[in-house]
Amino acid sequence: MSITPLMPVYPRCGVRPVRGEGCYLIGERGERYLDFASGIAVNALGHGDPRVVQTIADQAATLMHTSNLYGSPMGEKFAQMIVDSTFADTVFFTNSGAEAVECAIKTARRYHYANNAPHRHKIIAFSNAFHGRTLGTISATNQPKMRDGFEPLLPGFEVVAFNDLEAATAAVDDNTAGFLLETVQGEGGLMPATPEFLKGLRRLCDEQGLLLILDEVQCGMGRTGLLFAHEHYGVTPDIMSVAKGIGAGFPLGACLATEEAAKGMVFGTHGSTYGGNPLAMAVGTTVWDIINDEDFLANVRAMGERLRAGLEQLIPNHDELFDSVRGMGLMLGLRLKSDSRAFVAHLRDNHGLLSVGAGDNVVRILPPLVIGEDHIAECLQKLSAAARDYVPPAAG
Ligand SMILES: *Cc1c(COP(=O)(O)O)cnc(C)c1O
């Protein structure tokens, strides 16, 4: 037998973390990495945050799982906190991002069904999007590496060019339910929606009775310096998926919706065995309290500006390698003039800096939201050293 016991769907690198300390990961042989990947924007509070650790210990000893057959005092409390500080009137808790997007898609279809317009089932999604790996969420992307071999996928999706309002407008027909997009694309190359695009989609939705579904699984929860990225645009969605940073490392996701958009989601229409379990609710409440705080978010913005300025200063010194900086807050992308994956590996293996590759030759820089100036200085020093001794792989 040659297959590995862990199904070999990930090309795993040589980093084998066994412990985390704040903004650092420690590998099997004791080697330290500055973690500016944060488990792909998950470890918003770094590793081992004592408030999260204590919450888990206390709640695990009190009550870990019951069932959604029973009342949920902790779920009600957490959902109320979310409702109080967002556009949403109601929340469904999940265990992951893809499940939160699935719930968003179901909520949108069910809205039109409740309006006696069940033919309005088509979701317009966008090029280079990433919404997860379930059959429903891979149906909402055009990326062949995620779709090939899994057909037939879910019907009722059309993918048009991201940030192209004309294309989105042209794709709307009598069967359209709404638009699904990441406010800031993550995997696709760290690309924010333009203000004209997002505002234009909102306007189309308002004019034509469509739903605006934002996927803020990666860009939400303070990552861009505001609690949710759409707040930068003055645009609110009807439905939104959240995950990653909301549990800061504990598996948790949520689908948020307005009362109107959720009107089809009545008794018996949706469910989850684990979703909203007391342990997840306890962690979520603790993390929300920490991140939904003006001082915390102001620090994310300040550190984001500092890091961005530092990255921009690196470009002229290494202009054969670095192209540009993009992104918002602590969701930053350093675009290279060549493939980013090899440079991500070089940073990791030779300089102890963790980052994440993304589409369009982008190195994604997603530090814990609790970094300080010293971490930024260390990151910039490592990037600069790595640029100096980088030997790009031979072309072809
Ligand atoms: C990571 C991600 C998902 C999927 O989340 P999972 O927890 O892996 O299912 C969905 N949408 C976006 C924008 C993401 O970044």
Image (spheres, rainbow, N blue to C red):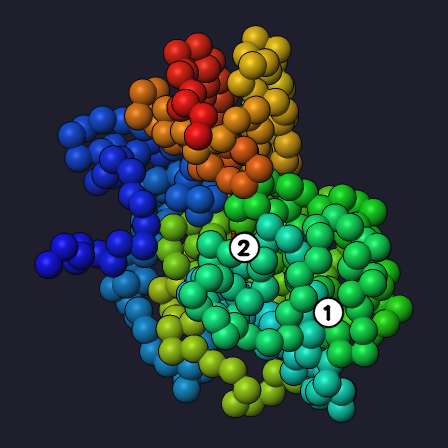
- Residue type at mark 2 is Gln
Report the residue at 51% width, 56% height from top. Answer: 144
Q: Secondary structure at mark 1?
A: strand
Classify mark 2: residues with Cα within 10 Å, few (<14), some (14-19) or many (20+): some
Left/right of residue 1 with respect to residue 39 in the rendered view: left
Q: In this picture, is 118 found above or below 351?
A: below
Residue 181 lies, in percent from the top left, at 66, 57
Q: Quadrant of the C terminus?
A: top left
Name which quarter of the figure residue 1 lies in: bottom left
Report the residue at 22% width, 26% height from top. Answer: 31
Report the residue at 76% width, 78% height from top. Answer: 175
Q: Can you see residue 150?
A: yes
Label 1 beta carbon less than 8 Å to ligand 1: no
Q: To which residue does mark 1 refer?
A: 178
Q: Nearer the viewer, residue 358 or 394?
A: 394
Residue 125 lies, in percent from the top left, at 66, 61
